[in-house]
Image (cartoon, rainbow, N blue to C red):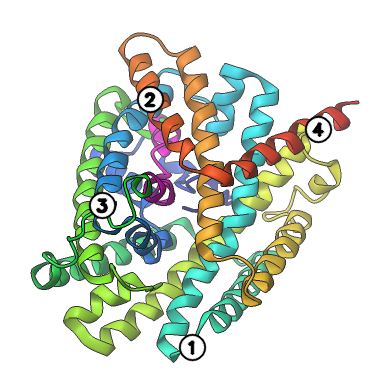
Amino acid sequence: MSAALAPTMRPSDPTTGTVVPADDRHRLGVLRGSALYVGALIGPGLLLIPALAAQTAGAASIVAWGGLLVLSAPLAITFAALGVRHPVAGGVSAYVREGLGEAAAAVTGVWFLTAVFLGGPAVSLIGGYYVADLTGSGTVVAALVGLAMFATVLTANAFGLRVSSGFQLALSSVLIVVMAVAISVALPARAGHNWTPFAPHGWWAVGTAANILVWLFIGWEAVAQLAGDFRRPSTELPRAMGIAFGVVTALYMGLAVATIGVTVGTDSRVPLADLISVGFGRLGRDATAVLAVALTMGTMNVYLAGAAKLSASLAQYGALPRWLAADAHRSVPRRPLAVIAAVGVTLLAGLAMGFGSAGDLVRATSALFIGVYLLAIVSAIRILDGRVRLAAVTALVAVAALAVFSAGFLVVPVAAAIVALALRRVLRT
């Protein structure tokens, strides 16, 4: 999960960061398109979140994985239909604006921005956990390493040093290969382990695990943004989406089974390192730590730059204070970066002192993205018709049910929505 709006690229959906060079318009084929969709889903969340789900629900977390994959089908169909039938620039917020109006679009933008404020430190902490595992340290060191990576990426963005989308896609590709190797090694050795008791924490925990895993399923809305880049979107887009869905399903289910076999019953925060070490020992574990740092820093570089540009854009629309847009002409506006830095450093400092956890940040961020999906799907129901509207209704019911398991973390999107609407009202008057 990342975000990017590079000056030489065509803007993309801010919740995924999938971008296509401007001179490549209408050149996407089925294979390249499916690769971009897979890249929109595969990210550093895979370095931690599978273990959080397994620790929450035990072996029953496999049900959560399966349920989210089933939910992905109507979601992907809905966003594909939006992209083909209503091609607009601006991502999910634009679709919400078209179906529900400016106020709902402002809430959508603020929800995403809040997710960046919370998700950025979470991503950096994930990399920190792998360094802490490499050095035999604990949470404090992980938080300090995460803080150092966060500061480095912020400084790089402030000086315009950007990671290209191509490099980010390459990092995701490496992660996919490493994950596939880890799964192929761990499954023969551990696939039958830790399946009893199947639901040690009860069945409600399955819903909680699904709520955690939502982070790994953010990205199907990239279909809508890339629709206009296919030569023949009505035929090539569904095929690309089908291939991507098959690849993601195979990888995720293999990862789910392997994670259950290796990490259930432990408090591991480095599940991919655990899987790799099954076949490659300490050397593989150390190499995974290096990959984790590279991937998290690359993702954050793109993530924070996109968030800064989104902040400036919201300020220009009147959803945020205008001073945030004062340097919107820069490739990465510095004023929003300063705000992101202040919030991120505060959160990471709090984590280092024992206040909260990476799991809390993941749950809060997932609740925000669930809210974004709910508004986008409601908008889709209003502007689509025929059988695709039925797919959107199915997706709405499933996402609404998933929102229930956010429990107390629902206060985050509710509070962000109140702030967004109040700010909009004040700034308009």
**Residues in magenta?**
207-227
Q: Which residue is mark 1?
A: 137
Calculate the distance from the C-alpha at mark 2 to the C-alpha at mark 3. Answer: 29 Å
- Three-letter code for the amino acid on which mark 2 is drawn: Thr
Residue at the far right in the pictured view: 429
Lower position in the chain sequence, tag 3 or tag 1:
3
Foreground: disc 3 or disc 4: 3
- Residue at the spot x=26%, y=69% of the render? 178
Residue 60 got which mark?
Answer: 3
Left or right of residue 258: residue 96: right
Q: Are marks 2 and 3 in contact (CB under 8 Å)?
A: no
Where is mark 2, residue-wise? 78
| Dominant SS type (magenta) | helix
Amino acid type at mark 3 = Ala
Disc 1 residue type? Ser
> Cα distance, mark 3 to mark 4?
42 Å
Which label lies toward us, 2 or 3? 3
Indicate the secondary structure of the residue bearing disc 4. helix
C-alpha separation, residue under disc 2 versus residue under disc 1 = 45 Å
